[in-house]
Image: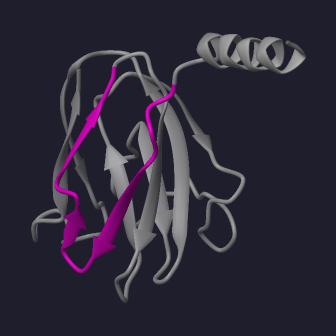
Amino acid sequence: MKTGLALLTFAFAAACAPQKDAGITVIAREMAFEPGEIHAARGKSIRVALENRGTVLHDWNVSGLKADGPAPSPHAAHSGHLDHAHPASQPPAAIHAMAEPGRTASLEFKPLEAGTYEYYCSVPGHREAGMRGILIVH
C-alpha cells in the first residue's frame, strides 16, 4: 500500500510540474543548420543546444519573437559560458547563443506569441550564404 501511495504522489507531483518542451539540438556547420525547421509551443519552455560542428564560430539568433528568457544553461559554452556578445556589428537578437568550433552552447526560453520566425547565424556572410531556418510557434 505504501508503494502504491508513493507512486501516486510521484505521479501527481510530475503532473503538476511546469510543462517544458523537449530540448532540441541545432547542429551548425559551414553555412547550414540542422534541422532547418523547429516547432515549439507557445507558453512552454524550450531548451536549445547549439552544437558547432563547423570549423569557424557560429551563432543562433531569433529576432522578433517575444519570449521569457533566454536563460543560459549552466553548461553552455562559448569559452566556457553562454556569450550574449554579438559578432561584427550585427544588431543583437532577442534570443542568441554562440559557440566556438567543437563547442556547444545552450539556452532556454519560453515563446509568448504564436507565429513563424526566422533563425539565423549572424556571423558576417553566413545568413546570406543560407545559414538560416524557421522556428514555428504554435
Please state the horizontal and vertical placement of residue 26, each as a whole percent of the image: 35, 59
In this view, the residue in front, 18 or 7, is 7
With respect to residue 46, does 19 lie above or below? above
The residue closer to the viewer here, 102 or 7, is 7
Please give the count of numbered marks on the rendered protein.
Answer: 0
Residue furthest bottom in the image:
55
Q: Residue furthest right?
A: 2
Measured from the top left, where is residue 133 in percent x and y?
Answer: 17, 52
Q: Quadrant of residue 126?
A: bottom left
Q: Please give the name of the residue rendered at 68% of the width and 10% of the height, measured from the top-left corner.
A: 12
Q: Is residue 26 magenta?
A: yes
What residue is rendered at 32% in x and 42% in y? 62
Residue 88 visible in this rendered orientation of the protein: no
Is 105 situated above or below 95? below
State the residue lying farthest toward the left: 129
Residue 31: in magenta span: yes
Residue located 47% across and 56% down the image: 49
Whether residue 108 appears in this view of the structure is yes
Q: Can you say which quadrant of the picture contains the N terminus?
A: top right
User: Residue 43: horizontal and vertical position, in percent?
Assistant: 42, 16
Residue 44 in the image: state x and y as whole percent. 45, 22
Q: Is residue 15 left or right of residue 127?
A: right
What's the coloring here?
Answer: one colour
Numbered range of the magenta stretch: 20-41
> In the image, is residue 91 above or below residue 22?
below
Would you identify the image quadrant in which residue 35 lies? bottom left
The residue located at (60%, 17%) in the rendering is 18
Q: Nearer the viewer, residue 72 or 10?
A: 10
Occupied quadrant, residue 136: top left
**For this view, does 94 lie left or right of residue 135?**
right
> Which quadrant: the C terminus?
top left
